[in-house]
Image (cartoon, helix red, strand yellow):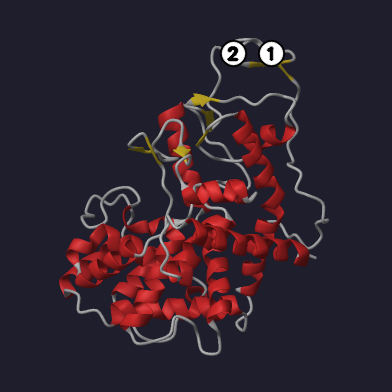
Amino acid sequence: MRDLISVSRQPFNPANEYAPALDTGCGNKLYAGEETPAFTPHTGVSIAGKNYSPAEKDYLVNAFVNDTLQNSNYENPEHLARRAKHFFTHIESEMAIGLGVEKDLLRDDSPASQLSSHMAHLVRGLWTHSKSDPAFREALHKELLAPSNDPGNVLLAGEGTGGLYLSMKNLHALLVRGEQGPLTREHAQQGAEMGFGIKAIAEALKAHDPMLSSVDAYTVQHRVGSNRVVDGVKTHHFTSRHGTDLRNDLGTQVRDELGMPVMLGTSGGASDVASTIRYAAQLQGQSMWPSGMDEKNGRAAMMGLVFHLMRNQVTDNAQGFYDKMRSDLHGLSAKRVEPALIFSHSFPEVVSGVEMTLNDEKPTDRQAMIHSTLLAKSLLEQAFANRT
């Protein structure tokens, strides 16, 4: 991520420029000196279930389609234009938040570092105090240290099983062993990743271990996520040809109304991290927050850490899944963009996931969704004002 210290206070201007295109009349755009293509490659943006190629006159929409990596379905051109405007209006603020977390993690006395370390110890405590079957733990430890495609894998067989795309298999192997002693500085900075990872492992392996089953049940009960179902079918950016469709998602509707950026809807992953840490703290008779940190500052730090996870730490994995989707569904090669422009979750989507979960609110509660979105709006404005 580039340093924003020297960036002016002007709105974000996408870097790419595009030559004027002529409408061929058959849905394709013809550029000067080019012959009419046999077909229009899928852009990753669809409108009402049809591949969309942006018109040359709308620079923001053009940049939104070409400069981001996504697979999304929008209702109509006007809807797409609004999403593009909201995205670029707030991208500098989001990048400033991500950069701020990166810098804070370099300082041991920062709220982000203190909370991350506390989260890491809470997650490790789940394994330390677990009465799991030793044979299961030994088998899981062995597979965590093996290559993902190892033919001997049984528990973790299958692509992406257990959320181990977080490049933290060695750390999870350490946790499974229940090893004591101080965490390394690097491990202490991975509290959000550890919370996310153990939930993913719990979802995949809950039938094998009572502790994992309890973690999964607790997070499912308290989950605040998005509604991606359209006409009875759940849409998804990696498996649906025209991608994620959020037309029925309340959180997305609120964010659209309030001019906030939208990516994939309210972050269920952020909700899972908040639930996992709360469950771990309750189980061990501890506070969710480190000594000396009040809940307001703790929540803000957690939102920042989870946002940093979503938009900075898992981008390599997200890139790989988008590459596979583009190849399998669209017959296209990989597309490379800035990590911050890979669609995962916007900051307001993360804030709602954390805030509403810790408030024990439901994803269908409109007033709660408005409240959490306004909180995110305030934090974005604060980040923009302070990015000097």
The disc at residue 64 is: none
In the rendered image, which quarter is residue 235 located in?
top left
Q: Secondary structure at mark 2?
A: loop
Residue located farthest toward the front when viewing the structure as drawn? 367
Look at the numbered discs 1 and 2 and tell me whether their residues touch, using CB distance below 8 Å.
Answer: yes
Say if 62 sits above or below 27 in the image.
below
Residue position marked by numbered label 2 in the rendering = 37
Q: Which residue appears at 52% of the width and 29% of the height?
A: 46
Q: In the depicted view, which residue is nearer to us: 211 or 184?
A: 211
Q: Quadrant of residue 123?
A: bottom left
Q: Quadrant of the N terminus?
A: bottom right
Q: Position of residue 30 (x, y in %)?
A: 68, 15
Element assignment for label 1: loop
In the rendered image, the vertical position of residue 46 relative to residue 266, given as above or below: above
Residue 126: x and y, percent?
31, 77
Q: Is residue 144 visible?
A: no
Q: Label 1 to label 2, Cα distance in Å? A: 8 Å
Q: Position of residue 333 (x, y in %)?
A: 51, 31
Where is mark 1, residue-wise?
A: 34
Kind of residue at disc 2: Pro
Q: Is 67 or 61 nearer to us in this picture?
A: 61
Rendered residue at 41%/43% (across/down) = 228
* Left or right relative to 108: residue 385: right
1 or 261: which is nearer to us? Answer: 261
Q: Quadrant of the C terminus?
A: bottom right
